[in-house]
């Protein structure tokens, strides 16, 4: 009681075609990680959340990506194999750039860990604004007894 509920409106993303359910389940869960920009000495924590459902309306995308300054944002899975993936986040408003940006993750998954590189570009003009590496660990990657 007394807690206010917050709801988020997501831009609908068409379902991806050709992704097999085993790949989607391999990326299911809550992933907590850090972005490390190449030209900055700052680590930005982020969260990726993916529903384990294989429903056609969610196959091919994470439910959302968020940081302290970025509200939940849709993520489209562009390519995926059993161990590698490419995902596009956004567009979303980046307060540091005072504008809309997109971020692309290119990474590998090994068990409960994903890592790779990212690049962020402004939507208008597609100018690069940030690039670096990311790493994330899936919460509860080991089943409970």
Image (spheres, rainbow, N blue to C red):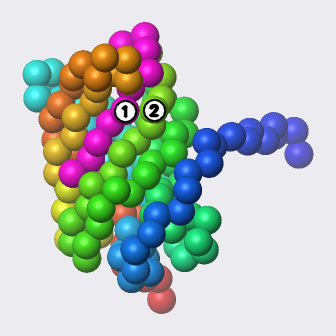
User: Which residue: 44% across, 21% down?
Assistant: 100
Q: Position of residue 116 (x, y in %)?
A: 17, 51
Prevailing secondary structure class for the magenta stretch in the rendered image = strand
Q: Residue furthest right?
A: 1
Q: Is residue 22 above or below residue 28?
A: below
User: Which residue: 27% across, 55% down?
Assistant: 86
Q: Is residue 27 above or below residue 145?
A: above
Quick check: 141 left or right of 133?
Answer: right
Which corner quadrant of the image does residue 97 belong to? top left
Residue 82 makes an appearance in the image:
yes
Q: Which mark is residue 87?
A: none
Q: Report crowding for label 1: few under 14, some 14 to 19, many 20 or more residues within 10 A (C-alpha).
A: some
Q: Residue furthest top?
A: 98
Quick check: 131 left or right of 48?
Answer: left
Which corner quadrant of the image does residue 114 belong to? bottom left
Q: Is residue 133 above or below residue 60?
A: above
Q: Is residue 126 above or below residue 26?
A: above
Q: Position of residue 98 (x, y in %)?
A: 43, 10
Q: Position of residue 93 (x, y in %)?
A: 48, 22
Q: Which residue is mark 1?
A: 102
* Magenta-colored stretch includes residue 29: no
Please name whichever residue, 46 or 82, is drawn nearer the observer in this view of the structure: 82
Please name whichever residue, 18 or 93, is drawn nearer the observer in this view of the structure: 18
Do the numbered discs 1 and 2 sit on residues whose CB atoms are within 8 Å?
Answer: yes
Q: Report crowding for label 2: few under 14, some 14 to 19, many 20 or more residues within 10 A (C-alpha).
A: some
* Magenta-colored stretch includes residue 105: yes
Dot 1 falls on a residue whose secondary structure is strand
Q: Position of residue 142 (x, y in %)?
A: 37, 78
Q: Which residue is mark 2?
A: 91
Image: magenta residue range: 97-106
User: Which residue: 40% across, 74% down?
Assistant: 18
Which corner quadrant of the image does residue 1 belong to? top right
């Amino acid at each position: 009681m007394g807690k206010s509920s917050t709801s988020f409106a997501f831009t609908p993303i068409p379902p991806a075609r050709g992704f097999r359910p085993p790949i989607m389940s391999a990326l299911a869960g809550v992933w907590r990680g850090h972005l490390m920009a190449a030209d900055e000495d700052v680590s930005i924590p982020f969260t990726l959340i993916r529903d384990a459902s294989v429903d056609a309306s969610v196959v091919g995308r994470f439910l959302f990506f968020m940081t302290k300054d970025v509200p939940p944002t849709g993520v489209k899975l562009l390519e995926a194999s059993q161990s590698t993936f490419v995902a596009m986040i956004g567009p979303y408003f980046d307060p540091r750039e005072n504008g809309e940006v997109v971020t692309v993750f290119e990474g590998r998954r090994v068990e409960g860990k994903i890592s790779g590189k990212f690049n962020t570009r402004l939507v208008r003009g597609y100018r690069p604004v940030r690039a670096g590496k990311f790493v994330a660990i899936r919460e509860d990657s080991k089943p409970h007894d």
